[in-house]
Amino acid sequence: MAQLSPALKQATPVLAERGEGVYLYDEAGRRHLDFTAGIGVTSTGHCHPRVVEAAQRQVATLIHGQYTTVMHRPLLRLTERLGDVLPDGLDSLFYMNSGSEAVEAAVRLARHVTGRHNIVVFQGGFHGRTMGAAALTTAGTKFRAGIGPVMPGAIVSPFPTAYRYGWDEEEATRFALRELDYALTTLVSPKDTAALLVEPVLGEGGYIPAPPAFLQGLRERADRHGLLLIVDEVQTGFGRTGRFWGHEHAGIRPDVVITAKGLASGFPLSAIAAPAALMEKAWPGSQGGTYGGNAVACAAALATLDVIQDEGLVDNAAEMGARLQDGLRKVAADHPQIGDVRGLGLMQASEFTGADGQPDPAAAQRAQKAAADRGLLLLTCGAAGNVVRFIPPLIVNAPQIDEALTLWAGCF
Ligand code: PMP
């Protein structure tokens, strides 16, 4: 008898049988409040009736219209609809299945467009596990330990992780931008550099929002040196941070946006968007894949956009995120081991720090496990695993936030 590889590590022992809204139900019929949302994927909640209906209808019509062989209407319709929510001018799209693939597609595009190979990333960033994306990932050595050599050309510059440095945001931002300038003077010439790649909120790296001045500083440097600014919105996109895109908090316009996760409510779908003038410089046939832009996933994404718009989920994420952060701060006030509470919208976290000022992963993991025992599903993140993150679906309401906070307060 075969068994599942132990290479797959699981955060909770739950064997999920069905999902409905913010809840998962296990085989014994126990209800779990799901504040993981499948790592920020099921933004419309589990099995939203409109997503289910759209997917079921599409399954009975056309499942796989392979997009380098034939074209299909759900993909064309989705492209049109995404044009309405993307930043002005990012009007050319390409689809894949996962975030990692989309990151690699963006790198491929940036290298074609510029004819240069280096990509500057920011320390603590997570961009995926495939070999190219892993080379760009510095959210923890575990993501690439023992698998190297990985893709060359990744240059790592500091992210303004203010809490870790013990500085305020302004000082951390000044430092990170100064170090980027120094890297572009000492490590790698802008003439050999294709792009800056950044997450608007460090996700796996510890739920650390990029200060607006940092993203604005990156935009300014990208313009000054003729680099592309690629924003990885895999976790922050589709309303998660209380704006449709995380970079909107900084008022900047990226050259390339990468999206996945919340895009299709759980169906594997990812995309990159860029100005047509850039996409036209990609070498013909350089992008593709067997399953990209699957018809059922595209139909689910169209329904996801309808739900986000009709139910006002972006505003709800802002409002419920503020309520959640406020409640997490109140819990932290009673528990000195929680050194920091931070986040944007429905991407919130509590960081555990020991009396010695060092990360305390054991305390974070104890709290995460105690929450799971009480029926509240949470995940950890951060390089040391000492950050507990809260990523409920965007449909979450005030009583559900309050229920989660009551459960959380009992976890210490
Ligand atoms: N980028 C970011 C910001 C992510 O959070 C993730 C997944 N956690 C990825 C890329 C990789 O996505 P996937 O797991 O779908 O390959």
Image: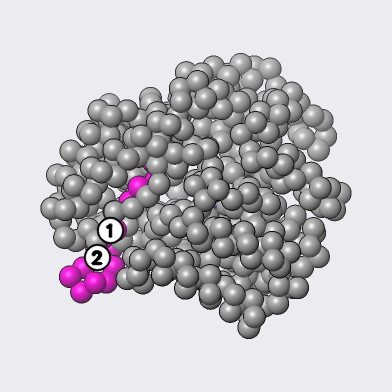
Q: Is residue 185 inside the magenta stretch?
A: no
Residue that appears at 47% across and 73% down: 175
Q: Nearer the viewer, residue 88 or 41?
A: 88
The secondary structure type at the circle numbered 1 is strand
Q: Which residue is mark 1?
A: 340
Residue farthest to the right? 284
Horizontal side, residue 87 vs residue 32: left or right: right
Please tell me whether mark 2 sits on a helix, a strand or a loop: loop
Residue at figure coordinates x 31%, y 61% from the top left: 386
The magenta region covers 346-363
Which of the pair 65/153 is nearer the observer?
A: 153
Disc 2 residue type?
Thr
Checking the image for residue 353, the label placed there is: 2
Cβ atoms at labels 2 and 1 below 8 Å apart = yes
State which quadrant residue 172 falls in: bottom left
Say if 202 sits above or below 2 in the image.
Answer: below
What amino acid is found at the position of numbered circle 1 in the picture? Asp
